[in-house]
């Protein structure tokens, strides 16, 4: 599931500091921008459209609630586990090359999603989509950073981020329209012309770039253990409601996930080029920012997974109306992002990172109040607005805190780690909230209220983590980062 509220640039800011192999002419720069906007927009739109299409998919493919969760989780699992590896592959073997492989894989998997005969095949195709997204998304901003000179880079990234925000708003509405008027398959088929356009543009106009100083092997063992650890844990959480916590399959999944998590830590500690350098977490601000991310994006990802389901299955909204319900959220973030970005300069990171999640907690609590029926404007609209304001106050200071906690040469890696944390948080939250919904048995409204109450509690905990760990005025980036960087290299 695409993380609504996560800064779009975080998805691509993995190792984005190298220069292109050759100078990039102005005409090519424009094509780089077009290709990366189309590719990242394709991934963002697909994620938001699937949530709206899920009730129809479940009905037509006769899927169980767990099956419907796996349609989302299989994609999120491979994206979260392989995102950092995708950035490393681009650094070493060419960003355009890995970017194009990701686009091709994503496009082919989208065609497979549209043509599947059963929900099992759809889950498998969505997993392949996640692999494609993990390869293409880190390359988007990396290609922009390599193609544009420093004086023009900020404007280019701003343009890319702005269009990404627009796609986040358009995606659910477009998906709902396609589901209502045609078929859920079109939520995937719409990716094909976009993927083809990106491939043609990139092949003809986008120059290759790579990190010439990058040495050492790609951390594939770490990626494998991370995937198994997340997969085992998610499998246990999602299968427990149907089979019981003492079921052999649930215990086996939990044991496998725990074993793989321990193996991942051991592999990363011994690796010469780990995808997750633990030395980064010696920075208090970096650790605090990532703990806040884990808690708040668990609330956001898990809570907003069930919101469209509530609107369609309980409130009787059409898929189009359900898709439009979160447009005010995205609009608030888009319009106020510049103002929010100045909060750190005025107040430092700590205060906005306490206030923002606290307001978001109020928004989640408001989602739990409406019952059945009633106008959108008097039921869910206030919750959407309050949540949007809270996340707007949080996102820019959070990103700034992460980037300022390390040296400039580690900024891409730090941002990639933070984005992987947010993806992992949503992945685990959807599985965990599935247990909560199952405990409510057939009372969807009661389960939804519990989910939103837990989300509000997670947001409060994220505010507390900022108060306890984030420094009022963080250390200068060069000093903080140099320390972390020397430790990670040593």
Image (cartoon, helix red, strand yellow):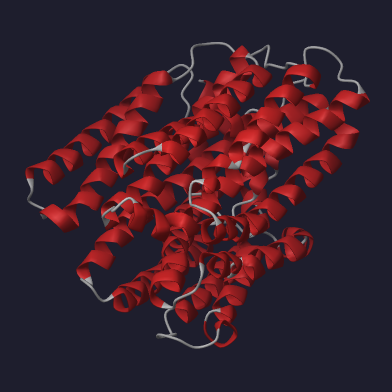
The outermost residue toward the front is 182
Q: Nearer the viewer, residue 259 or 186?
A: 186
Q: Is residue 379 above or below residue 231?
A: below
Query: Which residue is more in the foreground, 374 or 483?
Result: 374
Viewer-side residue, 239 vs 466: 239
State the image quarter where residue 269 is shown.
Answer: top left
Residue located 41% across and 48% down the image:
72
Q: Is residue 252 left or right of residue 71?
A: left
Residue 311 appears anywhere in the view: yes
Q: Residue 101's spot in the image, x, y percent?
A: 57, 21
User: Which residue is depicted at the point 21% across and 33% down?
Assistant: 259
Left or right side of 336 for 90: left
- Specify the quadrant of the image occupied by residue 407: top right
Return the residue nearer the eye: 378 or 386.
378
Residue 410 x %, y %: 63, 31
The residue shown at (20%, 50%) is 239
**Residue 476, image x, y percentages:** 70, 44
Residue 240, position in %: x, y? Answer: 17, 53
């Amino acid at each position: 599931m695409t993380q609504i509220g996560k800064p779009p640039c975080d998805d691509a800011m993995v190792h984005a500091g190298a220069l292109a192999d050759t100078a990039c002419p102005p005409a090519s720069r424009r094509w780089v921008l077009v290709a990366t906007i189309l590719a990242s927009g394709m991934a963002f739109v697909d994620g938001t459209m699937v949530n709206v299409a899920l009730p129809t998919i479940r009905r037509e493919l006769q899927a169980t609630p767990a099956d419907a969760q796996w349609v989302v989780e299989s994609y999120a699992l491979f994206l979260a586990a392989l995102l950092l590896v995708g950035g490393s592959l681009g650094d070493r073997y060419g960003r355009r090359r890995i970017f194009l492989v990701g686009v091709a894989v994503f496009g082919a998997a989208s065609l497979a999603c549209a043509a599947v005969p059963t929900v099992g095949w759809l889950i498998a195709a969505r997993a392949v989509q996640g692999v494609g997204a993990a390869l293409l998304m880190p390359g988007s901003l990396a290609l922009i950073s390599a193609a544009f000179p420093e004086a023009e880079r900020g404007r280019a990234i701003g343009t890319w981020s702005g269009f990404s925000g627009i796609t986040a708003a358009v995606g659910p509405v477009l998906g709902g329209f396609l589901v209502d008027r045609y078929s859920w398959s079109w939520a995937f088929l719409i990716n094909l012309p976009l993927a083809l356009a990106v491939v043609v543009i990139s092949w003809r106009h986008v120059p290759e770039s790579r990190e010439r100083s990058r040495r050492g092997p790609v951390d594939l063992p770490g990626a494998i253990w991370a995937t198994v650890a997340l997969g085992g844990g998610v499998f246990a959480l999602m299968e427990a409601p149907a089979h019981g916590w003492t079921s052999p399959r649930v215990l086996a999944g939990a044991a496998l996930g725990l074993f793989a998590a321990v193996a991942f830590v051991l592999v990363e500690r011994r690796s010469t080029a780990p995808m997750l350098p633990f030395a980064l977490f010696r920075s208090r601000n970096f650790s605090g920012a990532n703990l806040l991310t884990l808690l708040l994006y668990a609330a956001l990802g898990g809570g907003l997974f069930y919101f469209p389901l509530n609107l369609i299955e309980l409130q009787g909204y059409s898929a189009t109306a359900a898709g439009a319900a979160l447009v005010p959220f995205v609009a608030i973030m888009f319009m106020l992002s510049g103002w929010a970005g100045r909060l750190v300069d005025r107040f430092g990171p700590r205060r906005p990172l306490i206030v923002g999640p606290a307001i978001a907690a109020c928004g989640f609590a408001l989602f739990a109040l409406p019952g059945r029926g009633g106008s959108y404007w008097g039921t869910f609209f206030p919750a959407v607005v309050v949540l949007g304001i809270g996340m707007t106050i949080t996102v820019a200071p959070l990103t700034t805190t992460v980037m300022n906690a390390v040296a400039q040469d580690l900024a891409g890696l730090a941002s990639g780690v933070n984005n992987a944390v947010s993806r992992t948080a949503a992945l685990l939250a959807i599985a965990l909230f599935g247990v909560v919904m199952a405990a409510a048995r057939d009372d969807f409204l009661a389960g939804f209220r519990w989910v939103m109450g837990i989300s509000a509690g997670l947001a409060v905990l994220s505010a507390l983590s900022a108060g306890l760990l984030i420094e009022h005025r963080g250390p200068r980036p060069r000093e903080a980062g140099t320390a972390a960087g020397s430790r990670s290299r040593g």
